[in-house]
Image (cartoon, rainbow, N blue to C red):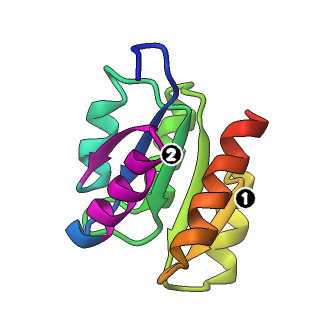
């Protein structure tokens, strides 16, 4: 992968989830960067410009929703996909207003996940 290839930023407080997603996407030849929390993600966004953001809805410290708000406040542009083990309708509505293009329920099917990411990147 070259420097101009699309980057994917994966933000999840669970190391196992980050590692699994990294391995799935890396096998597809995609450039993947991971962050353990929202603060780390915002710091990374100062130097990398991901095309796709896979972010957990609920994380300690700063939620995925708050990270999305800050990304929008800073004027960054990326395709956000929110991952959640929760189905809170109010949060989902607010996330959709912030531009979230898909919601992935955890645990997820690896093949379905991989196909979704490919489809989103092809449409980009």
Q: Nearer the viewer, residue 38 or 2?
A: 2
Q: Looking at the image, is mark 1 or mark 2 nearer the viewer?
A: 2
In this figure, what is the number of numbered marks? 2
When asked about the image quadrant of residue 12, the answer is bottom left
Q: Residue at x 26, y 56 (%)?
A: 37
The C terminus is located in which quarter? top right
In the visual, does 12 lie left or right of 112?
Answer: left
Disc number placed over residue 110 in the picture, else none: none
From this view, report whether residue 19 is shown above or below residue 84.
Answer: above
In the visual, does 55 lie left or right of 109?
Answer: left
Name the outermost residue toward the right: 123
When asked about the image quadrant of residue 104, the answer is bottom right
Q: Provide residue 44's location: percent of width, then percent of height.
A: 29, 32
Query: Which residue matches tag 2?
Result: 53
The secondary element bearing badge 2 is classed as: strand
Query: Which residue matches tag 1?
Result: 96
Q: CA distance from mark 1 to mark 2?
A: 14 Å
Is 84 magenta? The answer is no
From this view, report whether residue 64 is shown above or below residue 106.
Answer: above
Contact between marks 1 and 2 (CB within 8 A): the answer is no
The N terminus is located in which quarter? top left
Is 28 magenta? The answer is yes
Q: Residue at x 34, y 53 (%)?
A: 22
From this view, report whether residue 120 is shown above or below residue 116.
Answer: above
Q: Provide residue 99's location: percent of width, then percent of height.
A: 70, 48
Q: Residue at x 53, y 85 (%)?
A: 86
The secondary element bearing badge 1 is classed as: helix
Q: Provide residue 115's location: percent of width, then percent of height.
A: 65, 59
Dot 1, how many residues are within 10 Å of its Cα: few (below 14), some (14-19), or many (20+)? Answer: some
Q: Which residues are magenta?
A: 17-35
Q: Provide residue 60's location: percent of width, then percent of height.
A: 26, 69
Q: Nearer the viewer, residue 113 or 98?
A: 113
């Amino acid at each position: 992968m070259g420097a101009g290839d699309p980057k994917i930023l994966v933000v999840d407080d669970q190391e196992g989830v980050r590692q699994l997603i990294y391995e799935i996407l890396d096998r597809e030849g995609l450039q993947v960067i991971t962050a353990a929390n929202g603060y780390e993600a915002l710091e990374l966004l100062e130097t990398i410009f991901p095309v796709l953001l896979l972010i957990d809805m609920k994380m300690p410290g700063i939620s995925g929703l708050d990270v999305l708000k800050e990304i929008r406040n800073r004027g960054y542009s990326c395709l956000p996909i929110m991952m959640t083990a929760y189905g809170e309708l109010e949060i989902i509505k607010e996330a959709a207003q912030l531009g979230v293009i898909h919601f992935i329920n955890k645990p997820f099917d690896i093949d379905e996940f991989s196909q979704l990411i490919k489809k989103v990147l092809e449409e980009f």
